[in-house]
Image (cartoon, rainbow, N blue to C red):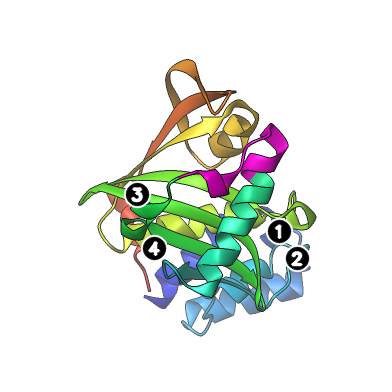
Amino acid sequence: MSMLRNLRHLRHCWGFFFTWPPSLYLLFSASIAFGTGEMESLDARNSCRQNHNPKMTFAEIPYGSSAYQAECTLRHEVLRVPIGLSLHDEDLSNERDQLHFGLFDEDELVACVIAVVLSPNEAKIRQMAVSPEHQRKGCGRLIIEGLERNLAARGVTHFSMHARRSAVGFYEKLGYSTIGEEFTEVGLPHARMEKSLNAAQAFLEDVP
């Protein structure tokens, strides 16, 4: 299992890995060979993204908690205020049955995302938001990858979403593909995007 965890980490850090001096490369290789490199934690993944605070953590947010209130505030400020709408005018009661996740810099919520489980193996991703001061630092990628790992462990292998046109390129880099024609939602052009994990990917996502 240690080897699988190491391989999974290499998937995220491959480019950085080959910038190491030969001495560090050999030391790292030896660590893998003897199964001593434990790199599954979010802290370790952050170590290959120099803009991230190593104390940043991914966690599920309980509906109705103080963290959920912080999530609603972040979604309102990032996703609704710029287009002249208010999240507080929306009926959020159905969110009780949805899964909420957050990326935390110590106690501060810096990114959030929601998953709607549609079937045992399918989920819809919605309302991903990153605080302005943490945008373009890899936090969006971290929280989507965290969501995928969490849901893959529950048996989900297919993900879909309605992505704003401005975010399509971001999701394409994470392996999502556009399906069908563009449409309008909350006054903005959107695209339906989907991603399926193959058996090998799902297994790696489920490595504890």
What's the distance in space between the residues labelled 2 and 4, CA to CA? 31 Å
Which residue is the site of mark 1?
Answer: 16
Type of the residue with mark 1: Phe
Q: Which residues are magenta?
A: 79-90
What's the distance in space between the residues labelled 1 and 2, CA to CA? 7 Å
Type of the residue with mark 2: Trp
What's the distance in space between the residues labelled 3 and 4, CA to CA? 13 Å
Residue contact between numbered discs 1 and 2, judged by CB atoms under 8 Å = yes
Element class at badge 1: helix
Front residue of 29/104: it is 104
Q: Is residue 90 in view from this perspective?
A: yes
141 is within the stretch colored magenta: no
Figure quadrant of the C terminus = bottom left
Reading the chain from its start, which is encountered first: label 2 or label 3? 2
User: Tag on residue 150?
Assistant: 4
Q: Position of residue 136 (x, y in %)?
A: 75, 49
**Residue drawn 55% across the image and 38% down it:** 171
What's the distance in space between the residues labelled 2 and 3, CA to CA? 41 Å
